Image (spheres, helix red, strand yellow):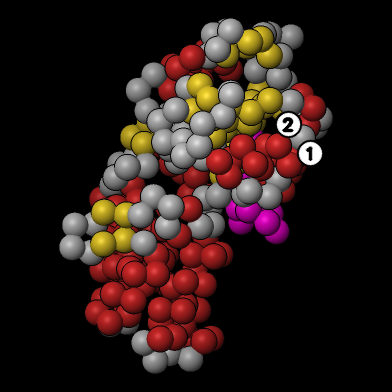
Amino acid sequence: MPNLTINGRKYSPTLILFDVDGTLVDDSHRYSSLGKARYTAFKEHASENAAEKWAELAGINPSDWTIDPSGPISKAPRRDDLAIAGGALYLDGHNWYDARELAERIYELADKTQAATFKPVIYEGVKEKLQELHDAGFRLGIATNGVTSITETMLDGLGVGDLFSIIVGADMVERSKPAPDMILLACNRTGVPISEAMYVGDQPTDIRAAKAAGANAYVAVRNQIEEATENTSSVADFEV
């Protein structure tokens, strides 16, 4: 079994699971782009008032497209995000059932707009390091609060999709992070005991999910971590 050295400590995980946004992929502009696409779709298919209400609830500033990094647009799983969108449409005068249906349509249209106009960027050195880990014999996987299909398409477009044995999004589980459900599901589907899994993320919720799951180890990358932990490291620190 290959060994992994992080900050001078050796690990031998069978499966290394990763978060995506802020961990592998630069999310500094991705959510601004998504916010702009959704805001525009709200204006075109509902009203400017609904767009403004949604932006306030989602945590995005339409004047410059900056986002609240702790807000729903960057942190909430899709089902929670859609509930917020439905709430904005309800406040704009739609009944709840119509609001939820329209919210889903608006988000789907925004997804298509972003896919056509925005190219995600993987952090420098990550693609090479993932390939190195894969070639060394580690199994790699994804556990993200994002949508599974969107994540798969994005990773394929970045040229790293085939490196992952499993991709689990929040739409595949009952509870999203910080609950351990998606980490446990990834281990279950790959047949790897949780005691042989490592989880890598950039947020305290990632570490909480890994602890709750009982993962063998957890690593908090430095780029956007909100709370320091004794295991704070970065993907670039992996030595195989």
Front in this rendered view, residue 69 or 102: 69
Q: Is residue 52 above or below residue 113?
A: below
Residue 164 visible at all? no
Tell me the amino acid under the disc marked 2.
Answer: Ala
**Residue 58, image quadrant:** bottom left
Q: Quadrant of the C terminus?
A: top right
| Disc 2: which residue | 215
Residue at the left extreme of this rendering: 63
Label 1 CA crowd tier, 10 Å (few <14, some 14–19, many 20+): few
- Left-right relation of 63 to 10: left
Q: Mark 2 Cα within 10 Å, few/some/many (few <14, many 20+)?
A: many
110 up-or-down from 31: above or below: below
Q: Position of residue 99 (x, y in %)?
A: 46, 83
Q: Secondary structure at mark 2?
A: loop
Q: Residue 13 occupies which quadrant of the picture?
A: top right
The quarter holding residue 195 reads top right
Query: Which badge, 2 or 1, is on the more N-terminal residue?
Result: 1
- Count up the numbered dots: 2
| Foreground label between 2 and 1 | 2
- Name the one closer to the observer, 27 or 142: 27
* Residue at x-position 43% and y-position 90%: 94
Residue under pointer 1 = 188
In the rendered image, which quarter contains the N terminus?
A: top right
Looking at the image, which residue is at 58% across and 17% down?
134
Q: Amino acid at mark 1?
A: Asn
* Residue 31 magenta: no
Residue 112 rendering spot, x and y as whole percentages: 36, 58
For the magenta stretch, what is the residue range?
A: 166-176
